[in-house]
Amino acid sequence: MHLYALVYLVNLCEPYIDRNDDSFIPDGEFKPNIKNSVMFVYQWWLQCVVIVVNYSGRPFMESMSENWKLKWLLILNFFVLTSCIFNTSDELRELFELVPYPSEDFKMEVI
């Protein structure tokens, strides 16, 4: 399933990629482009989902509702990720070195 999602997102990015862009030089300096921006957000989202799904809770640990630090940290992560996708903050986008997504339809496809 994850491989399918990766392939789907890469194919979704293809029409917006300029192969002559400096960001595609193999050993060059990092420059953000639409593909690495989408992959970064997807991988971050996936890590958060894996934590939520694999959290065992009782009887070995606190339940998710009792572990308020983890719960709010995950909620904050999903909020920041959604903000990155919908480009609500230029500072946040620049902090993570992401490019803005090209259209509203593209954003909804990524979500």
Image: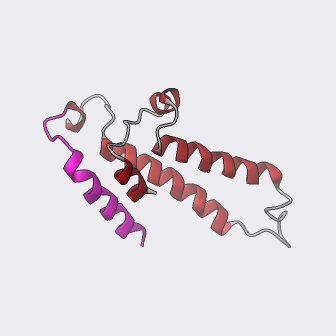
Does residue 8 appear to the left or right of 85 in the view shown? Answer: left
Residue at horizontal 32 percent and vertical 64 percent from the top: 8
- Using the image, determine if residue 14 lies above or below residue 51: above
Does residue 87 appear to the left or right of 5 in the view shown? Answer: right
Q: Position of residue 17 (x, y in %)?
A: 21, 44
Residue at horizontal 71 percent and vertical 47 percent from the top: 73
Of 5 and 25, which appears nearest the observer?
5
Total label count? 0
Which residues lie in the magenta part? 1-21
- Using the image, determine if residue 107 lies above or below residue 60: above
Residue at horizontal 45 percent and vertical 54 percent from the top: 42
Confirm whether the magenta stretch covers residue 95.
no
In this view, the residue farthest toward the front is: 104
Of 109 and 35, which appears nearest the observer?
109
- Using the image, determine if residue 67 lies above or below residue 25: below
Confirm whether the magenta stretch covers residue 19.
yes
Of 18 and 62, which appears nearest the observer?
18
Residue at horizontal 35 percent and vertical 69 percent from the top: 4
Q: Position of residue 6 (x, y in %)?
A: 36, 61
Which quarter of the picture shows residue 63?
Answer: bottom right
In this view, the residue farthest toward the left is: 20
Classified by dominant secondary structure, the portion drawn in magenta counts as: helix
